[in-house]
Amino acid sequence: KNQVEQSPQSLIILEGKNCTLQCNYTVSPFSNLRWYKQDTGRGPVSLTIMTFSENTKSNGRYTATLDADTKQSSLHITASQLSDSASYICVVSARSGGATNKLIFGTGTLLAVQP
Amino acid sequence: NAGVTQTPKFRILKIGQSMTLQCTQDMNHNYMYWYRQDPGMGLKLIYYSVGAGITDKGEVPNGYNVSRSTTEDFPLRLELAAPSQTSVYFCASSWPPDRAQGAFFGQGTRLTVV
């Protein structure tokens, strides 16, 4: 069964600190993995995309890693800011063989950055 | 740039009522999607479309219908609202799924069925 599991469910950190969010998946055949940021009351916004051959990708203070062998990804946030408070969703795309790949969403990690 | 626009943002329905959630995008994307997000759960795909005139079912299509008469618009219809349809609904659009940009999501419609 295709699944995406994220940990922790929620996290509270102080402004300026770093944190790492985890994503484990059992999706096959794997196409790509994306991290989305979802602010409260808004739709998700794409942060990064990683394909099978990519190990690390950065987007400003966000760095995503992918280990395709262990089927794990992490999202590292450096020097956190209050605006980083949001839900971070890991989304894995499975090749469906049809017109569109199947997207499997994790339930997200709710991050709260406190002053 | 408007992106993906959903209306309404909030709605309360009585059991058995019908309504249409509107979604429009101005990015000329071929792919459009409707998801629902229940508390503590990941997004679930209701319906999707790969172009005007083409729609297909996702994971949880029961109780919903869609149409795609134009590239821009992808309305979601609830015919007989049930409490189980209380959720936040997101419309999204994208280029083919393997493109780097990912999907663009609307702001969501919070629907309560009482």
Image: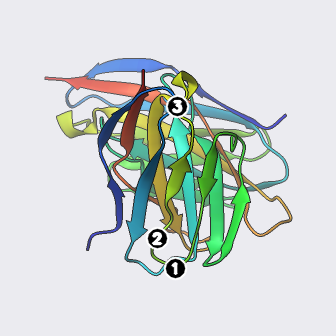
Label 1 and label 2: CA atoms lie apart by 6 Å
Q: Do labels 2 and 3 touch, CB within 8 Å?
A: no
Which chain contains the residue that carries disc 1?
B
**Left or right: residue B40 compared with residue A85:** right
Q: Are the residues under marks 1 and 3 on the same chain?
A: yes
Residue lying at 42% horizontally and 61% vertically, measured from the top left: B23
Give the mark toward the camera: 1 or 3: 3
Task: Judge the density around disc 1: few (<14), some (14-19), many (≥20) Cα neighbours within 10 Å.
Answer: few
Badge 1 is on which residue?
B70
Q: Nearer the viewer, residue B6 or A16?
A: B6
Q: Do labels 1 and 3 touch, CB within 8 Å?
A: no
Quadrant (top left/top right/bottom left/bottom right) for the N terminus of chain A: top right
State the image coordinates of residue B13 (x, y, percent, origin top left). Answer: 40, 32
Label 1 and label 3: CA atoms lie apart by 29 Å
**Helix, strand or loop under label 2:** loop
**Helix, strand or loop under label 1:** loop
State the image coordinates of residue A3 (x, y, percent, origin top left). Answer: 74, 34
Badge 3 is on which residue?
B16
Where is A40 relative to B33, above or below?
Answer: above
Q: Do labels 1 and 2 touch, CB within 8 Å?
A: yes
Quarter of the image for residue A7 reads top right
State the image coordinates of residue A23 (x, y, percent, origin top left). Answer: 61, 34
Which mark, by number, is residue B73? 2
Which mark, by number, is residue B108? none
Quarter of the image for residue A47 reads bottom left
Task: Judge the density around disc 2: few (<14), some (14-19), many (≥20) Cα neighbours within 10 Å.
Answer: some
Tag 1: residue type? Thr
Q: Are the residues under marks 1 and 2 on the same chain?
A: yes
